Amino acid sequence: MLSVSKLAQIIIRRSISRSNALYRPMIYPIERRTFLSPQKLSKNGQCKLQRAEESMDPKEILKRIETIEKNNKPSKEVKKSMWQKVKDEATHYWHGMKLLGLDIKISSRLTYKLLTGSTLTRREHRQLRRTTADIVRLVPLSVFLMVPFMEFLLPVALKVFPNMLPSTFENKKIQEEKKLKLVKVRLEMAKFLQETIAESGQNGSLVDTTHGQEFVDFFRKMRTTGEQPSTEDLIKIASKFEDELTLDNLSRPQLISMCRYMNIKAFGTDNFLRFQIQNHMRQLKLDDQAIQQEGIDHLTTTELHAACAARGIRTIGASNERLRGELAQWLDLQLNHHVPWTLLILSRAFCFTDGMTHEEALRATFNSLPDNLVNEAELHMLETMGTSTYKQKLDVLEQQEEMIEDESEQEEKEKKVHEALSEKMPSDADHKGLTEEQKDNFQKALSKLRSKVDFLGQRAQLNEIKFHHKDYKQLVEDIRAATNKESNVSASRLSKRLEKMLNALDKELDSLENEDQEKEKKEEKRAQAQ
């Protein structure tokens, strides 16, 4: 019999694969829930719903799992010969060079068009930008070709730094791995973003004024009484916030989470993170205007997925129709209703993790905004109307002063750490003077680090499967509510069996973690005794 861990790993691999229809309901829960909403289900929708349920044959799935359990030895894959591997790699790089040459030829024509004063379309601008980035990547590669005998180190450099190659040399496997890695990071950072914003969003004291009462009543209903405002009120109040005002009042953990969610490198001080986010969103604003001018229907599938991924919209498991609807809603809120992009990104984080609707996510975002942000937004609005009070100005000024002090302390600490590291930086002589015992300690530390990284990767995969299974259970409930039809016995058995596997794997990972901790404690005791 296969162990629980091996069987769960098989399920994890199949859940990630797009082409496998076995666990497709677990990967595509949001699209189906939106497409097959019980409130908006028509007769055609019921037919599609029945076909979606019938296409997934639980009995066949159970038979396949039982077959896997009976086969102890997995089938051996046919290994390619060395000549076949070299031939495939040479063909791959030859096609990449031809594609890069074609891109350079097209981009040179676009550059001439740009220099003559003509305007480029959005697709032409993206083509020129991508080719320019590929040419820049060729600069470090040229060093390996110019220095004698350095080309032998090129495979090692490409193995360590795979992003050195231009985009034309990337195969589908590398692109899919990058997408899956980005989805995992976004899931983790979106959950952390939710928690940190919810912790800082406590009930604040709002000043009762005659003017701007609508703004004050809105947050009092949201935070104090729990009354849910309408969608029109949400959009109306959201347009009164400003991007810079919202971004300046977010804490460092929230800024880091926002950077990682938008696939931005989260390094540096708070001001540098804000600068990076502002530059990224400035480019997205220009892209929004170009998309609205040319039309969403003119986007290809690749361009549509890239545009949605850049805006934090979930793309894996979503149809083109759903992505076009998501992108159209983004453009409508951003360009027509003037909703700040910071609030849109925060609301997308709630949609990404909890599967909320856009209205529910926007309500949750408003309900979890920090007090200093709400107070400063209220003061800014009342100042434009000439009805602000000195008490409001004093409160906001004190809050901003505290944030400035925190930022200055953070910069001083970072400066001290940088100076201390530069002073303690070991010289080449120190490296040469390492003993064999110290080298062994380094090797042990590296091996521990690798094991911890592997453990964290397995834990992340397990959490992702749990997330998909939760959405799948919700999909089953939606089907039951829409069709008044009980799910068959085989589907229920399959769901229970999968839950048992996940729980067993979770316990196994916990036991492995405890064993590693015990080993570390024993080694520490031995080191202290020596």
Image: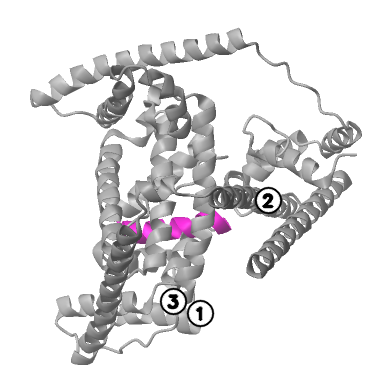
The front one of 357 and 179 is 179
Residue type at mark 1: give it: Gly
> Would you say the residues marked 2 and 3 are in contact, meaning their CB atoms lie under 8 Å apart?
no
- Marks 3 and 1, how far apart at CA: 14 Å
Q: Amino acid type of disc 2?
A: Leu
* Amino acid type at mark 3: Gly
In the image, taking residue 512 as reference, residue 227 lies left or right, namely left
In the foreground, 471 or 76: 76
Find residue 270 and report its horizontal and vertical position in percent. Answer: 30, 64
Image marks 3 and 1: residues in contact by CB distance under 8 Å: no
Secondary structure predominantly adopted by residues drawn in magenta: helix
Give the percent coordinates (x, y) of residue 8: 76, 44
Q: Nearer the viewer, mark 2 or mark 3?
A: 2
Say which quadrant the N terminus sits in: top right
x and y, in percent, of residue 113 in the image:
14, 21
Residue at image point 71% right, 65% down: 522
For marks 2 and 3 on the same chain, the one whose residue lies earlier in the sequence = 3
Q: Which residue is mark 2?
A: 462
Q: Which residue is mark 1?
A: 226
Front-lying residue, 133 or 342 = 133
Region rendered in magenta: 336-355
